[in-house]
Image: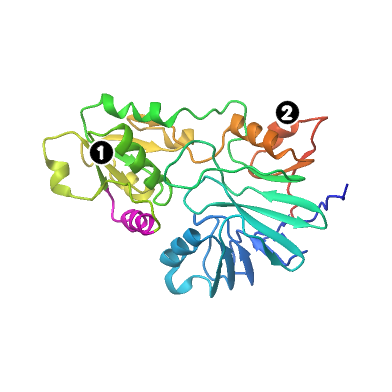
Amino acid sequence: MEAILSDFLVQRAEGYYCKYGDFFIDPMLPVHRAVVTHAHADHASRGQDTVFCTVPTASFVRYRYRQHAARNFMETPYHQPFSIGDVILRFIPAGHMLGSAQVEMVYRGVTYLFTGDYKRQADDTCEPLETVTADVLITESTFADPRIVHPDPVEELSKINNTPHHILMGTYALGKAQRLTSLLNTHCPDRRVLVHHGILPFHRIYTALGITQLRYEPYDKRALKAGTGHLVYLVPPMAFNSYFRAIPFVRAFASGWERLQRQNDLSLYISDHVDWNDILYCIGEVKPREIWTVHGEGQHLANHFAGNIPVKRLLHL
């Protein structure tokens, strides 16, 4: 059995760095070679030289950063191996949003799997999560807490059907907004979905990339002032905060974070991350010899697997 290299991937100021292939994963500062898991702004930044990513991720990054996007995009389909230095990589669907990927890295017979952000819940606006075996699982631990169990999103949305009023729904513009539109279309069919101008371009890119089932309308102030109470207005976080009591909406913010549910009229716990039970399931599927954690608190996992699987934070250099 080949030895695991404890410094195969380390955290540096720029991002997660692999010296054995001389590349970064999800760097936040400009670097010469970036492997990007998905297009959310806390994972895909401007000014990179060469970016390796999926086709949808490249589309979103090009739109968001325009002339400040990467100089070169190496767009790679899921499952297709490619090499950077002596490391062989593959993108595996992560289920987080359209184009999101886990990064499988093989070096000297050892497989390291970097999850990026991922989820197990059903989502017809993106590729479903796939699991593969690996010697080392490098997992996000955003909600890695036994007390956190994400509810069924359909049950959460059923709360909307019980109110006769307009809904002002806060959401992240990319990924979450498109998932919510599809969920609302399916499970709240009497609701018309209006989309804020900051979200609309991403809906259109989703359509161009083959997600054609979304039914929505651009923001229409006249419709909001009408007497009917069957509208859901999707707005990004900044707009959600600025609309505080400006119009008689029922306010809800779709997120797994409890702090974003405070002071709203309706709680709406819909997350695009794995919860505790999902992480345990994925660990069972991956069957790692070691677990390295990023993003959030990994101590609960360390306690849970004590004596069975070593769990540690990614090295910070």
Residue 296 image position (x, y, % from top left)? 62, 41
Element type at marker 1?
A: loop
* Real-space CA distance between mark 1 and mark 2, rounded to the nearest whole angstrom: 44 Å
Q: Which residue is mark 1?
A: 245
Query: In the orientation shown, which residue stands out farthest toward the front?
Result: 80
Q: Would residue 317 be visible to someone looking at this image?
A: no
Residue 130 image position (x, y, % from top left)? 59, 43
Give yes or no for residue 149 being in the magenta stretch.
no
In which quadrant of the rendered view does residue 17 lie?
Answer: bottom right
Element type at marker 2?
A: helix
Which amino acid, mark 1? Arg
Q: Residues within 10 Å of mark 1 (few under 14, many from 20)?
A: few
Q: Would residue 231 be visible to someone looking at this image?
A: yes
Residue stretch in magenta = 195-208
Residue at x 39% of width, y 26% of height: 155
Q: Main secondary structure of the magenta part?
A: helix
Residue at x 64% of width, y 32% of height: 281
Residue 220 image position (x, y, % from top left)? 18, 50
Q: How is the image coloured?
A: rainbow
Which amino acid, mark 2? His
Position of residue 149 relative to residue 312, above or below, is above
Nearest the camera: 204 or 299? 204
Nearest the camera: 299 or 91? 91
Residue 229 image position (x, y, % from top left)? 18, 33
Please give the label number shown on residue 157: none
In which quadrant of the rendered view does residue 180 lie?
Answer: top left
Q: Which residue is mark 2?
A: 304
